[in-house]
Image: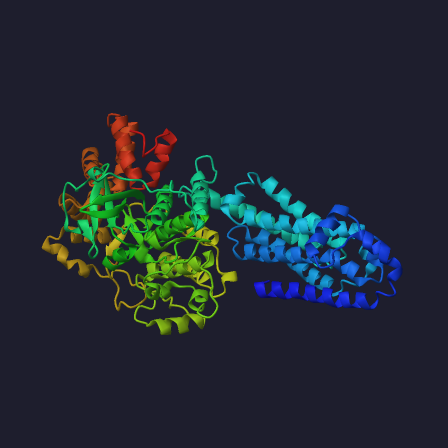
Amino acid sequence: MDQSTLESDISDIAETTKVLEKINKVKSTELASKANQENQEKVTQDNSTRIFVESIKSNTLETSAISPDATKIVKPFVPFIESVTIVISEIIVVYENVRYNKKICDSLMDRVNAAEAAIKTFKRRLTENFQFHNQEYYKSFIRFIEIMKRIKKFMADVSNLHGYQKFVHSDSFKGIFDSLAKDFDIVMTELHFILAVANDERRRIDQSGLKSDIADMTKFLERIGGDIIDQNQKINIVLREVSLMKEKLDHADSSDKNIKANKIEPTDLSDPLMSKATDRRGKSPQIIKKMYKNFEVACMPIDLQNGEKIQGHLAILGKLRESPNIIRFYGLSNTENLDVMVFEWADYGSLRELYCKYDIAWHVKVQIALDICRGLTFLHSCDILHHDIRCEHIMMATGLIPKIAKLNYSRMARGPTSDMRGVTDAMRWMAPEKLNDSINHVPYTFKCEIFSFGMLLWELVFEKIPYEKWDILKIKKHVLAGKREKITFGKAEPDVKRLQKDLAKIIVSAWQGDPAIRASLQNIFMNLVQLADEYCTDKETAVKLLPDKELDLDGSLSRAVSISDFAHADLDNALAKYWKGYYLWEGIQVEKDRKQACKLFKEAADDDIADAQLRYAISFANNPPVKFDREIFLKYMTKAADNNNPIAQFHLGDVYLHGNLNKKKDEELGKKYLRLAALNNQSGAKDLLQKLGINVYTDV
């Protein structure tokens, strides 16, 4: 029910009242004998709100309610109808923004639709069936309104993580739903409303949906991670803190000057020990690399003219650092005579820069997509929308960990909308409802963001910008016609082909034209989890980044990869030697030759290639023909670890912590390597430190 329908219904009620008042006037002579009784009722006919209040106070309908005086029958119900009509319209808004427990909300919405139809019929036949309009009927209508309000609150709670947290146990969750459904069915019967949903089949569907949603939420909360769920399996309190800060900033007249970003003294920023050409990025004013508390940081210039508003938004951005998949914001500072925002440094630059330089291995694409989904879930749980999600706005940190960035154009979900620079370019990722809102403005919603995320997934999979050489008018016409980018894959191994097919299904589910059938972020996340479990396990040592144009992503490459592409390995190129060794080790497009692979790994390792150092060490453990050499294994594993390879850091930490491989136990050194691995987001190290009760950020 939209606003125009609501206004129309209220107008119909008012018009009905006017007509009935005229009828009453004509009959006034006939009813003269009842004049004294009517005066005693003290009913003010032109004030429906007062009638509503007075009716509730008296909690009764006198005999006039079943008299020929139709106005007396209509008037007490006018505010009721208005009230329930408004509540129904509010429930519809809640339903359109459901993010979780969709099946349960569907069951409740079926009842709301039945109530809406019944109210329309009731309004048309208000003066009929006088025998029903008695005191008990009146009380039932009041209960009906309260039940509708309870449905609205319950639906709002279960459809977001904040509200869902109230239902600690599934039994409580189920009990409230069952109570609501039962009370609704009873009051509908009391009001003689047609109830098309109260039958055995409906109840079976209800219980099936309830069971399914509870199971899905349990799995989702178990796997979401990303610091959305704390160690006590509760929603991170930071999400609530951000929501409270957001509520204050949502008010344009908010004068709270205490919401400020952290201040970093300029003296706390220092230059890197070893300067590189890549320490400055972008065009003037450039992003500058500095050191802050032994962390590499990016100093991004900012205009602080609108200081208070920016301070508030940056304070919230500082809270978002709780998520490992949102760029960490340390605070505001000043360097080189510039006001700057201080962020964590992302070694690889943006995800777009990464895929332009390398081909990203398929299992890594899945993990990147999964982590971005975690970051988006964290944002959405704070009622924050990014508004411009694409690979260019995802920064890639050490360990190929994606970090959602460019949040300077993000807004609160219900906050004011401002102009977005680069909106023309952003249209390549934009939902069709936003492309088509030039006539009637369509607000940017969570479902718009899901469409854009689907386009980001397509961009990541095929490593190119959507509709790259198309003009905006062509894109708009294409998308609004229900068409999308092509999904056509090139040559690949059978397991990769299965992965590609599953990724394609996820992308298609996200970019549905009708927002109502567009996949939820929860659904996308769980599908990505399933992909990761199936295709990404036991691949910690697999190559993550390949030479550019190595993979035939869309069938555009005319030939398969050949070992001859690495002929320059014979020219003493260390990285090429490593890649040639990898292909020989795995038998990719050539016959396996692990002896030759080991030789190439060692040559590349001695030239300080970290991945080669790890591979050479592992070759002694996973190569039966070669006798295991503990000293060589530890030597090259240590080199790789000191070269910031997280897998090597984890294994070396485990060796020292437990005294494995006949190595003298050194718990402090072991914890040091494990902490480094955890900071590089190595899952095994993080799990081990958690079991030991060690906080990677605070424990020394």
Q: Position of residue 103 (x, y in %)?
A: 57, 53
Q: Nearer the viewer, residue 200 or 404?
A: 404
Q: Where's the N terminus, which quadrant?
A: bottom right
Q: Nearer the viewer, residue 552 or 617?
A: 552
25 sits to left or right of 465: right
Position of 238 relative to 467 (above/below):
above
Residue 321 occupies quadrant: top left
Can residue 326 be seen in the rendering of this structure? no
Residue drawn where x is 35% and y is 55% of the image: 409
Can residue 646 be seen in the rendering of this structure? yes
Residue 559 occupies quadrant: bottom left
Residue drawn where x is 24% and y is 36% of the image: 293
Position of 327 relative to 480 (above/below):
above
Q: Position of residue 411 (x, y in %)?
A: 40, 53
Q: Where's the C terminus, which quadrant?
A: top left
Q: Position of residue 469 (x, y in %)?
A: 30, 71
Q: Nearer the viewer, residue 454 or 240?
A: 240
Q: Position of residue 454 (x, y in %)?
A: 40, 60
Residue sitting at the far right? 33
Q: Nearer the viewer, residue 426 or 38?
A: 38
